[in-house]
Image (cartoon, rainbow, N blue to C red):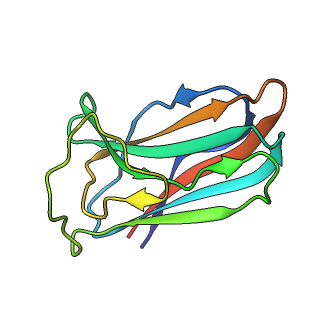
């Protein structure tokens, strides 16, 4: 049965932040992460980049996904990232390197997860979004 883990509760945000990491529950074979952007009250130059980081121990973090950039004057969206050990990677991952926009490292995950976002030029405008993970 799937379990929901909230990595970032739905809220309006206009500043960059790294959320607190959480330990993912139990044993699971697949992880589905949902970025749900419900409001983008911003101008064309405003941008939102959302990342998903993982850790094996809760201390050292590596990037597993970067969702497609949301521009302030574009329709809101929902995006999904799938992490599944049945889809192994073919290369090592530098712990300090972020994925490109819209890229997922499908076999790069750990016991701990956190959301991280960068808001550019948002001023008083903001983006309302949530990030949730579902273990299967």
The image quadrant of residue 135 is bottom left
**How many numbered callouts?**
0
Q: Residue furthest front?
A: 45
Between 85 and 66, the residue placed more toward the observer is 66
Residue pictured at 46% horizontal, 30% vertical? 20
Left or right position of 114 against 72: left
Q: Position of residue 79 (x, y in %)?
A: 58, 63
Look at the picture and state if 50 lies above or below 15. below
Between 63 and 114, the residue placed more toward the observer is 63
Left or right position of 69 against 87: right
Q: Position of residue 115 (x, y in %)?
A: 48, 41
Residue pictured at 66% horizontal, 31% vertical? 120
Q: Position of residue 107 (x, y in %)?
A: 24, 62
Quadrant (top left/top right/bottom left/bottom right) for the N terminus: bottom left
Quadrant (top left/top right/bottom left/bottom right) for the C terminus: bottom left
Look at the picture and state if 99 lies above or below 135. above
Between 52 and 44, the residue placed more toward the observer is 44
Q: Position of residue 55 (x, y in %)?
A: 27, 40
The image quadrant of residue 36 is bottom right
Left or right position of 59 against 103: left
């Amino acid at each position: 049965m799937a379990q929901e883990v909230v990595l970032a509760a739905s809220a309006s945000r206009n500043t960059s932040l790294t959320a607190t990491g959480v330990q993912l529950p139990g044993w699971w074979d697949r992880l589905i992460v949902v970025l749900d952007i419900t409001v983008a009250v911003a101008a064309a130059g405003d941008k939102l980049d959302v990342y998903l980081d993982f850790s094996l121990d809760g201390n050292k973090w590596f990037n597993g996904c970067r969702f497609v950039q949301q521009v302030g004057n574009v329709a809101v969206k929902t995006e999904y990232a799938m992490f599944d050990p049945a889809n192994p990677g073919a290369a090592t991952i530098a712990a300090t390197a972020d994925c490109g926009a819209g890229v997922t490292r499908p076999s790069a995950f750990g016991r701990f997860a956190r959301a991280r976002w960068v808001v550019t030029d948002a001023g008083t405008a903001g983006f309302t979004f949530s990030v949730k993970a579902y273990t299967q």
